[in-house]
Image (cartoon, rainbow, N blue to C red):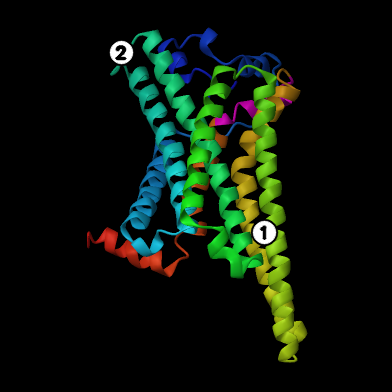
Amino acid sequence: MAVQGSQRRLLGSLNSTPTAIPQLGLAANQTGARCLEVSISDGLFLSLGLVSLVENALVVATIAKNRNLHSPMYCFICCLALSDLLVSGSNMLETAVILLLEAGALVARAAVLQQLDNVIDVITCSSMLSSLCFLGAIAVDRYISIFYALRYHSIVILPRARRAVAAIWVASVVFSTLFIAYYDHVAVLLCLVVFFLAMLVLMAVLYVHMLARACQHAQGIARLHKRQRPVHQGFGLKGAVTLTILLGIFFLCWGPFFLHLTLIVLCPEHPTCGCIFKNFNLFLALIICNAIIDPLIYAFHSQELRRTLKEVLTCSW
């Protein structure tokens, strides 16, 4: 993604001179500040990307194979998997091209690399935006299924879900193209940070409300059986743990990347911020880790999907 700390990575590999090093990294080094930099090897980065690529490709293939999974909920899950697949694939492609350039196995003109870098940046940015949008869409879908259960199948219909999916993809591509074109503007970075915070708040509010409703339902059942405290407390604790894990993984995997963008706006030349900027590859790796975890949270819990996945793995088409 074309932001400071990673901007023009392909061109930097073509011309591996001090002038190609991001300015923020130089500012941090010139101060003499000691930084904690977590090094992510290219092998580890490619391995994480490959795992995510294969895992999310299996989710897409599984949902496509089973017509019983062609529902709005699984439509959003499939698109989330496709977004995560593109996030991993685009980062793997960029890393592979950089390694080939550094090894001298690939020779290309700067103009060609510039265009390739722009295309990869747009794919990466749009897939990140769409991934966040589909996480929010899944939360909204689950919220409607709980609070409007009787009307769910009339509210969330497949044609409406497809239109929402199309709108998300189009908006993600358009906005990511604008973001990449104007990546050096503060307003662009602020828009990305605000968008992340909006998705975080949306998911937190919806899931907390769903947890509260589930606890109330469990409490009502417990009263009928005269076992109010044990059942209610146990259910509430389990729900709170699940909610903490879900939101915690989301925040831990996506938060550092958007913290990076925030600090670019607030303190681009401060030594401490410069130390954080040097861990940009770690932040990208965390996003890819989230792409690995997403299928475990949203897809593989379904017994129907797991059964179809076994058929896909055994080529029982």
* Towards the viewer: 204 or 19: 204
Residue 276 image position (x, y, % from top left): 66, 29
Judging by the rendered image, the residue that carries numbered circle 2 is 107
User: Mark 1 belongs to which amino acid?
Assistant: Tyr
The answer to whether residue 41 is visible is yes
- Going from N to C along the chain, the mark reached first, 2 or 1, is 2
Amino acid at the residue labelled 2: Val
Magenta stretch: includes residue 284: no
Residue 39 appears in the figure: no
Picture disc at residue 207: 1
Question: What residue is at 56 percent from the left and 22 percent from the top?
Answer: 178
Q: Is residue 174 above or below residue 240?
A: above
Q: Residue furthest front?
A: 154
Q: Which is nearer the eye, 43 or 238? A: 238
Q: Position of residue 314 (x, y in %)?
A: 24, 61
Indicate the secondary structure of the residue bearing disc 1: helix
